[in-house]
Image (spheres, grey):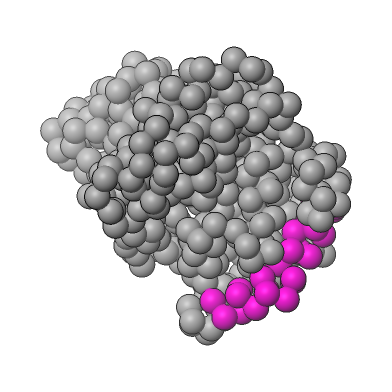
Amino acid sequence: MRTVDLITKKRDGGELTEQEINSLIAGYTDGSIPDYQMSAMAMAIFFRGMTSTERANLTMAMVHSGETIDLSEISGVKVDKHSTGGVGDTTTLVLAPLVASIGVPVAKMSGRGLGHTGGTIDKLESVPGFHVEIDNQKFLDLVNLNGLAVIGQSDNLTPADKKLYGLRDVTGTVNSIPLIASSIMSKKIASGADAIVLDVKTGDGAFMKEMSEAEELAACMVDIGNRVGRRTVAVLSDMSQPLGNAIGNALEVKEAIDTLRGVGPEDLTELCLTLGSHMAVLSGVASSKEDARLKLEQAIANGQALDKFKTFLAAQGGDASVVDHPERLPSARYHFEVPAKVAGFVAAIAAENMGLAAMLLGAGRATKESAIDLAVGIVLHKKIGDPILVGESLATIHANSEDVDQVITKIYESIRIQAQSVTPPPLLVGEVK
């Protein structure tokens, strides 16, 4: 069947067969199907959607468009975790060593940040000497040895998804649930995971700002995972304010260390315990979420999780002494407090705007080519619902320039204070299995 016939079929609400989807993705990957025809198909999918079977077939077609990672050499059930992104989302830095410390093998492929969302690799590279440029065999060996390793995303993983993602970005088809879900799940499946735990964010700082959209995306991804033989669970979590207190690479590493010590922010700790409990159950290390949570809390309390983080950093060339001496992490030359102008209660913290404020300091990338300043960022001192006095600091700016007027303005724009008390939003807002 010609490509134009497939476009017409989807435009008119038809269901594409597995063979048709495979042919479409193979042709687009090898260049025989041009961008303009795939743009038309993406728009047809945007308006017509896809059935559950189509979504699963599209996902697997993208998985098979490039190389896949074989984790069979690693003993145990490999559980991957994916977050749909947000501001101050430090979960992987805490979660990976935490679950590894109780016996869940973590073979993690991570990316760099773009825009206001930070990348796990950028954060880890705040640790002097740490690197992710290791070959696949060493990656597997490290997971077998230490239970944990992190590697950069391969250029040859899901090339069809990379091409299609770039096309969607310039054709107004980014916000298509089937295309988002198949994009995320294709990378997770190609990365070799046996099971997947998804952290789907909703709220101002999330990609899916409306709860209904986040629920639909979560259900779609869980359905894809389970259909193709990967046990998949999704947790829906709030991103109407930044997660934790730190926004910025080295600052988030320090916050992760605090959390592994048991003295981190409550919301970050709770989210990691929740996601980690699902990972432990899926891997078979725990019999229930309650059993898993107890094991994870004990690993924090007895120092096991923190020791695992040190081992992980050292194994990939990092200076593990930063765990006990966080002052050895990159630090900014200047610190500026942002005092409250009125008293009351914090009613809102615009997460996306706070992420953009940190990006102005150099903590994020405006483009893929942008250099990141690992030392800079913002540390919040208040969360939604907290009382605040006039002159009390809302946040501390960590900067390598004295010119922070724009950043201060953005922070004031982002934080709303009111006279009446405020009920904080719930962190965990749903679950899909």
Residue displayed at 45% across by 56% down: 198
Residue found at x 86% / y 47%:
319
In the picture, the quarter occupied by the N terminus is top left
Q: Main secondary structure of the magenta part?
A: helix
Residue depicted at x 77% and y 40%: 329
Residue 305 seen in this snapshot = yes
From which residue to which does the magenta span run? 293-315
Give left or right: position of 362 versus 207.
right
Whether 311 is among the magenta residues is: yes
Q: Depth check: give the residue in front, 172 or 323.
A: 323
- Where is residue 170 drawn, in percent x and y? 37, 18
Q: Eyeballing the image, is 197 above or below 2?
A: below
Q: Is residue 230 above or below residue 183?
A: below
Q: Is residue 44 above or below residue 183?
A: above
Residue 269 coordinates in the image, percent (x, y): 54, 62
Quadrant for the C terminus in the image: bottom left
Where residue 119 appears, x then y in whole percent?
A: 59, 38
Location of residue 207 (image quadrant): top left
Tell me residue 218's x, y (percent): 34, 54
